[in-house]
Image: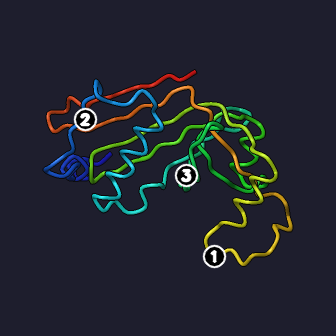
Amino acid sequence: MSEPFRQMLRALPDFPERLPDFDPDSAPADPAELFRLWLDEALAAGVPQPNACSLATADGQGRPSSRMLILKDIDADGWHFATSRESRKGQELAANPHAALNFFWQQQGRQVRVAGDVVELSAEASAADWQARPGADGSENENTDWQLYAIRPREIEFWQARHDRRHIRHRYAPR
């Protein structure tokens, strides 16, 4: 790496002057409840598209890939997202049904990481998700390859940046 480039990267600002406080001792017992609270706070702070996250998957040989997508829901089935079964991520999930999500809200110095096993949700749930997509024209999903998935968390970590670099990590291990 060239030294000027390295120096430029090191000099980039990281987090805003004011960061929210986070006391893990006062966090709710349910990680989904804490996520909803942090999402509400991100929305109130003007974070654009705080439901966007990186989804990391791996193929059958363990070679990773990641991409951005939108969280669809959180319920007893897990943390929902959707894709075509024929897409790269759909094929990777068929070969290796484990994944991780990462939400990053730079304006608040926060991220949330969710990792676990992935399950396919029902055909009815997938069809309903297809119909509810923004801009959907109301037509049936002719390919029937649209699939709603859920990550069933093995681990959820909430991370709060601090300017003194003593970042706060709060980890849930539901299963």
Determine the secondary structure under disc 3.
loop
Q: What kind of residue is marked 2?
A: Phe
Residue ID at (37%, 44%): 37
Q: Quadrant of residue 134?
A: bottom right
Instruction: Of the two numbered discs 2 and 3 on the same chain, state the one appearing first in sequence.
Output: 2
Above or below, 32 against 17 in this view is: above
User: How many C-alpha atoms fall within 10 Å of the one at disc 3: few (<14), some, or many (≥20)?
Assistant: some
- 158 left or right of 137? left
Q: Quadrant of residue 57?
A: top right
Q: Looking at this view, is 25 or 113 the one in front? A: 25
Q: Position of residue 167 (x, y in %)?
A: 25, 31
Q: What kind of residue is marked 3?
A: Leu
Instruction: Of the two numbered discs 3 and 1 on the same chain, state the one appearing first in sequence.
Output: 3
Q: What kind of residue is marked 1?
A: Gly
- 33 left or right of 100? left
Residue ID at (73%, 55%): 87
**Looking at the figure, which quarter contains the N terminus?**
top left
- Residue 135's tag is 1
- 151 left or right of 174? right
Determine the secondary structure under disc 1.
loop
Instruction: Of the two numbered discs 2 and 1 on the same chain, state the one appearing first in sequence.
Output: 2
Determine contact: label 2, label 3, CB under 8 Å. Answer: no
Residue ID at (20%, 37%): 162
Residue topped by disc 2: 22
Q: Is residue 3 visible?
A: no
Determine contact: label 3, label 1, CB under 8 Å. Answer: no
- Residue 71's tag is 3
Q: Position of residue 54 (x, y in %)?
A: 51, 48
Q: Position of residue 161 (x, y in %)?
A: 25, 38
